């Protein structure tokens, strides 16, 4: 297959996976994100293509889909794989920032499903902060913000203390 066609197929599958995830079609979203990874992996390593970055994008979608399916261990693994990339090279306001937020949120969902409530709380809190800081457009932002707030309430800590003057979120130091 020609490289340009593989790239187009990979991005199309990823886009479908994101849409399916927002619509709650978790099985389809998982299949689409895995298909996106397969298409990207068919590209020769010598091609000018950010394999690591694209795989992080696909794992961010896959993590959400797996968490929605109740497959919490693999969801946590996918979220952590995505976050390995985003925490080092992510830009919150860039296009990939929406997937960075999604990976943090999905990590929280996986941790909650595994009974690791304190870690889940921290992940949902971080996702909420990131959503508040992101000024770029993001499909499903309001729903994700609402879901983060509901998760914080569900985990028994609905209110957070006020942030001190000059507070900066952790990701701002790397941006």
Image: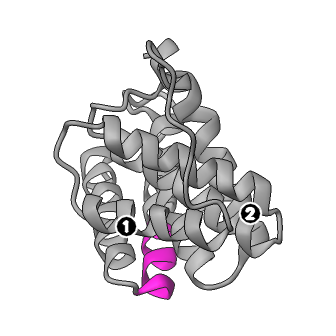
- Quarter residue 48 falls in: top left
In this rendering, is residue 160 above or below 20? Answer: above
In this rendering, is residue 44 above or below 15? Answer: above
Q: Is residue 167 left or right of residue 75?
A: left
Image x and y of residue 65, in percent: 52, 74
In this rendering, is residue 20 above or below 47? Answer: below
Magenta part of the chain: 25-35
Mark 1 element type? helix
Of labels 1 and 2, the one closer to you: 1
Residue identifier under label 1: 146
Contact between marks 1 and 2 (CB within 8 A): the answer is no
User: Label 2: how many residues lie within 10 Å, few (<14), some (14-19) or many (20+)?
Assistant: many
Residue 111: which numbered mark, if any?
A: 2
Image x and y of residue 157, in percent: 65, 60
Mark 2 element type? helix
Q: Is residue 59 visible?
A: no
Q: Is residue 79 left or right of residue 52?
A: right
Q: Quadrant of the N terminus?
A: bottom left
> Chief secondary structure of the magenta span?
helix
Q: Who is closer to the viewer here, 114 or 66?
A: 114
Residue at the extreme left of the image, as rendered:
137
Q: Who is closer to the viewer here, 132 or 141?
A: 132
User: Label 1: how many residues lie within 10 Å, few (<14), some (14-19) or many (20+)?
Assistant: few
Q: Is residue 49 visible?
A: yes
Specify whether residue 53 is painted magenta.
no
Q: Who is closer to the viewer here, 47 or 159?
A: 159
């Amino acid at each position: 297959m020609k490289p340009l066609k593989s790239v187009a197929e990979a991005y199309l599958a990823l886009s479908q996976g994101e849409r399916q995830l927002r619509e709650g079609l978790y099985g389809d979203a998982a299949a689409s994100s895995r298909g996106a990874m397969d298409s990207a992996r068919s590209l020769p390593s010598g091609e000018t293509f950010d394999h690591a970055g694209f795989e992080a994008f696909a794992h961010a979608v896959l993590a959400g889909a797996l968490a929605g399916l109740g497959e919490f261990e693999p969801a946590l693994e996918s979220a952590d794989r995505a976050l390995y990339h985003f925490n080092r090279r992510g830009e919150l306001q860039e296009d990939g920032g929406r997937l960075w937020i999604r990976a943090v949120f999905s990590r929280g969902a996986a941790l909650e499903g595994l009974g690791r409530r304190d870690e889940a709380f921290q992940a949902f809190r971080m996702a909420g902060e990131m959503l508040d800081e992101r000024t770029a457009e993001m499909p499903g932002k309001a729903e994700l913000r609402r879901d983060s707030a509901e998760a914080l309430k569900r985990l028994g800590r609905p209110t957070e203390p006020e942030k001190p003057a000059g507070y900066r979120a952790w990701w701002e130091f790397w941006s």
